[in-house]
Amino acid sequence: MNLSKRAFFSLIVILSTIQTRAQLTTTNLPIVIITSVNPVDSVQAQASLSIVDNISGTNNITDPPTFTGMIGINTRGNASYNKKSYTVETWSAPTVSQNVPILSMPAENDWVLLAAYPDRSLLRNSITMNLHEKMGRYAPRMKHCEVVVNGQYMGIYLFGEKIKRDSLRLDLAKLTNLDNFGENMTGGYILKVNEGVGNGWISMIAPPYATTQQIKFNIDYPDLSDITPSQKAYIQSYIDSFENAMNAANFQDTTLGWRRFGAVNGFADFMIMNEVSRNNEAYRKNMYMFKDKSKKLRPGPLWAFDIAWNNTQSCAGSKDTGWTFNLGGTCPLESDLAPFWFSKLLTDTSFVKDLRCLYTDYRKPGNVLDTAKIFFNIDSINTRLNAQGAVARNFTQWPIWGVPIVNEPTPMAANYAEEVANLKQFIRKRIIWLDSKWILNTGCPAPLAVSDIDLINLFAIYPNPVNDIVNISFSGKSKNGYNVSVYSIQGSKIYSSYSKERSTSINISTLPKGMYLLNITTDKGSMTRKIVKE
């Protein structure tokens, strides 16, 4: 790749602002190498992408790449950070998108490289996505890697999926410009809250504690250039109806209230994750929502937890007690406040019981929010990041120990081990406080007992929620096949089958709407996932 004199000197100027403190030779993490003719900035530019990810698990910067391709790349996020995040689009030719599988993730063309610069644990996004996925929700897949841009070592990043409508990402119906009537117009849509109104509108109802603050909805999918006036009018009307129902006197009515428009478990899981993590930006920034065809509104997928999990003192973000949804009560002058829905939901007695039952189940030994399992996940990632010096290289390149970035809790951690220990201590204290508010010892349906063997990486269950057909795909090996059973939430067996196939389907169209338990048992153990019939 030849550089013009002007481009060469521009590149020298850019790189000279970043002092080279660390050099990468060998690592156990994938190596992502980006080379561009011009410096990478906020405007998408052509570049080449090479990845070294050897089967042996040992990667050298001089090894032949296991992936190469053309990309479009630009910076994203906070421009003041020296360690930049990037948006990456894989191309077959300049500006021509090409779907490719990268780092064992499903083929697509839109990707991100997240620096997570303020997150000294390098863990916060990973553990959040992992927990939400284990709740049965789509969470963007992310892989830790080490990154080199134009010969400059940039440290540890997360390479992963950008939130996008796709059958292998956020699996929603695809809207075309012909879908302007009836059921076809009802989905899918992806919205962002408080991200401007270029392709959206302003809520009719101000957030709690607002003076001049408003809630803004922006349509992320379909794109501004693709959405039709009828589709835009439909989704705005749907959100308006949801808000009006939530704001009405009969909002708790299970038939006439907000449940006509919003999915109970979707909102419950979303609140549980944001409250457990004490996410300072919860409900108001980096907040997505989606609506699929003929289905209800759901918050999510989750995104950007860099300053969650006790990483800022701002607006009580480091307290292990108190409610995150009530940020306006702590910081009413914040420019972005949360919609009124979440404080209203916690006055809905039926919703609160559903949420508490979910939380109580998640907290049982071996389940999603068992602190032993959370800490095992943290320790596993920690071990991998430290195995061949990646953490040391990252913080040699970016010596930010003791350097305030996002109003971190004090005293600040002096090193990586202390940062991870502080993170665990916060999780332990936060969950103890939430247990005192949400654990229910009686009154919840007893979930099916399951073994403490996690098969989540071997089985994919989709779609969820479901109208009629549940699909199960199996990527493991089992000479004896596997059994699939469906139980009511009370534990009564409704359906059972046996399969040795890589994929199988279950028709539950005749079952009443509600939540069910799907159990898969193999010779290696068993797993249970909640599925929602709509």
Image (spheres, helix red, strand yellow):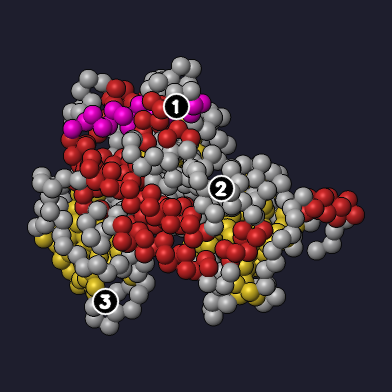
Return the disc, 1 or 2, that comes first in the chain's sequence.
2
Residue 524 marker: 3
Q: Residues within 10 Å of mark 2 (few under 14, many from 20)?
A: many
Q: What stretch of residues is rendered in magenta? A: 334-349
Q: Is residue 20 visible?
A: yes
Report the amino acid beneath label 2.
Answer: Pro
Height in image: 255 above or below 165? above
Q: Residues within 10 Å of mark 3 (few under 14, many from 20)?
A: few
Q: Residue furthest top?
A: 211
Report the amino acid beneath label 3.
Answer: Lys
Q: Which residue is mark 2?
A: 118
- Answer with the quarter of the image where residue 159 lies: bottom right
Q: Nearer the viewer, mark 3 or mark 1?
A: 1
Rendered-image quadrant of the N terminus? bottom right
Q: Residue furthest front?
A: 411
Q: CB of mark 1 within 8 Å of CB of mark 2?
A: no
Q: Which residue is mark 1?
A: 331
Q: Nearer the viewer, mark 2 or mark 3?
A: 2
Rendered-image quadrant of the C terminus? top left
Return the disc, 3 or 1, that comes first in the chain's sequence.
1
On the image, the x and y values in percent for residue 140 come to 46, 54
Predominant SS of the magenta segment: loop
Distance of mark 2 from mark 3, alpha carbons? Answer: 40 Å
- Image-based side of 505 in relation to 281, left or right: left
Return the disc, 2 or 3, that comes first in the chain's sequence.
2
Height in image: 355 above or below 60? above
Secondary structure of residue under mark 1: loop
Q: Nearer the viewer, residue 506 or 380?
A: 380
